[in-house]
């Protein structure tokens, strides 16, 4: 049995369902490695998603609607289904919280471990700070990896990008490598509609396991950025980034067909997951703080209009991003209205739709709150 998140104007009915159906269980669901009390929710997102609108229009987030949860979205309690991916969550945005939500995955990396993140565009982007991630990077004995950008700025050339990584403190906590400093390697795309191949950094295959640390936020072109963006555009070489942005046409990065770009992100992400043992050697953590409408590729992002929410983890990138989207939409009193606008105006949920369609992951998930 699953539950669908409802549009905002049905929040009263939703609350009534929650009061009668939501409960707390002491035993973790199947697949959980945690020992603490956990709240499990089995969630299935809207099939259609919100209607695409212009950034300048009302997002539909009614500031008078006070019946939606303002932190963890309420959902109907169900038995855990082993076929439904688990998303773990904590509201503790700290090194300890990050470590706890990572350890809840029960994942043991093998071989050389890469920790993929965004180094953040100077001077003031909202990249994940080294002091937040250091403990988990140490725990996996990881090398922090990135790829060069495909636009101007401080991270488009390898030497400058290494300097940014040093300036932002990443080289102080771990080894660091620009994966495409020596060009690209090609990954096949299976089952795609716009891509047949994906171009990642040439050193991508030097690592056996990947921990994907993503700062969840908005994005000027994709609507939002999370785990899927981090393994597609994020792991793409400069060449690969341009290829994805053009929707696999090799044309303009900025003037292509929007849905083709969104689908290319999903397909590039699937090629990465497929290469890594069909997802066995990759896991994902999304940090939901500093929730600007702008990406960490923007050196001067807009201030958020929404409070920090928490840290989430999953072995399924689609489920993880969907859970973060649902948390955004669950906010009340106008929180996050600009982020909702950004997502909808770029048809951002289409990335999730296509990712599920091609088999990258599942938009249905079980949300487990690991906080006591």
Image: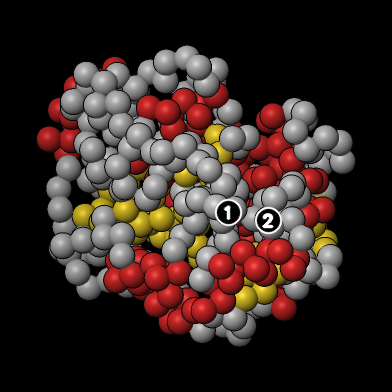
Label 1 or label 2, whichever comes before in sequence order: 1
Q: Between 146 and 36, which is closer to the camera in this rendering?
A: 146
Q: Residue at x 83, y 35 (%)?
A: 252
Residue at 69% across, 57% down? 155
Horizontal side of 255 relative to 297 (left or right) equals right
Work out whether 306 lies above or below 315. above
Q: Is residue 318 left or right of residue 59?
A: right
Quarter of the image for the C terminus: give it: bottom left
Q: x and y percent of residue 335 in the render?
A: 30, 31
Q: Is residue 292 above or below residue 84?
A: above
Would you identify the image quadrant in which residue 178 lies? bottom right
In the rendered image, residue 153, in percent from the top left (x then y), is placed at 70, 50
The quarter holding residue 135 reads bottom left
Give the numbered dot on residue 227. Answer: none
Residue 102: x and y, percent? 39, 69
* Camera-side residue of 132 and 345: 132
The residue most toward the left is 19
Cβ–Cβ under 8 Å for marks 1 and 2? yes
Q: Say which element carries label 2.
A: loop
Residue identifier under label 2: 154
Q: Which residue is under mark 1?
A: 122
Residue 101 locus on image (x, y percent): 34, 66
Q: Quadrant where the N terminus lies?
A: top left
Residue at figure coordinates x 19%, y 69% from the top left: 36
Q: Kindly state the secondary structure of the residue where label 1 is placed.
A: loop
- Whether residue 222 appears in this view of the structure is yes
> Crowding near pointer 1: few (<14 within 10 Å), some, many (20+)?
some
Residue at image position (26%, 21%) is: 63
């Amino acid at each position: 049995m699953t539950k669908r998140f409802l549009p905002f104007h049905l929040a009263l009915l939703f609350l009534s369902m929650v009061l009668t159906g939501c409960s707390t269980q002491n035993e973790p669901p199947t697949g959980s490695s945690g020992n603490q009390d956990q709240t499990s929710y089995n969630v299935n997102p809207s099939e259609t998603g919100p209607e695409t609108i212009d950034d300048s229009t009302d997002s539909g987030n009614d500031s008078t609607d006070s019946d939606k949860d303002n932190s963890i979205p309420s959902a109907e309690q169900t038995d855990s289904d082993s076929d439904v991916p688990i998303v773990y969550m904590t509201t503790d945005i700290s090194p300890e919280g990050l470590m706890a939500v990572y350890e809840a995955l029960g994942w043991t990396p093998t071989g050389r471990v890469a920790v993929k993140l965004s180094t953040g565009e100077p001077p003031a982007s909202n990249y994940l700070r080294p002091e937040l991630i250091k403990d988990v990077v140490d725990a996996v004995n990881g090398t922090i990896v990135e790829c060069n950008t495909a636009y101007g700025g401080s991270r488009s050339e390898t030497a400058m990008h290494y300097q940014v990584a040093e300036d932002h403190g990443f080289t102080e906590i771990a080894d660091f490598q620009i994966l495409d400093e020596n060009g690209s390697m090609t990954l096949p795309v299976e089952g795609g509609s716009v891509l047949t191949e994906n171009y990642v950094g040439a050193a991508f295959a030097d690592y056996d396991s990947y921990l994907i640390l993503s700062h969840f936020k908005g994005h000027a072109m994709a609507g939002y950025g999370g785990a899927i963006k981090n393994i597609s555009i994020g792991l793409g070489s400069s060449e690969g980034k341009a290829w994805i942005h053009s929707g696999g046409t090799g044309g303009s990065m900025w003037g292509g067909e929007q849905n083709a770009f969104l689908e290319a992100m999903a397909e590039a992400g699937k090629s990465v997951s497929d290469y890594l043992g069909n997802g066995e050697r990759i896991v994902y953590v999304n940090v939901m703080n500093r929730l600007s409408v702008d990406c960490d590729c923007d050196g001067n992002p807009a201030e958020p209009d929404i409070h920090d929410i928490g840290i989430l983890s999953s072995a399924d990138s689609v489920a993880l991003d969907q859970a973060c989207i649902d948390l955004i939409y669950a906010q009340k009193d106008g929180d996050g209205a600009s982020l909702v606008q950004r997502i909808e105006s770029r048809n951002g949920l289409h990335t999730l739709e296509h990712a599920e369609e091609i088999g990258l992951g599942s938009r249905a998930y079980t949300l487990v709150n690991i906080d006591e």
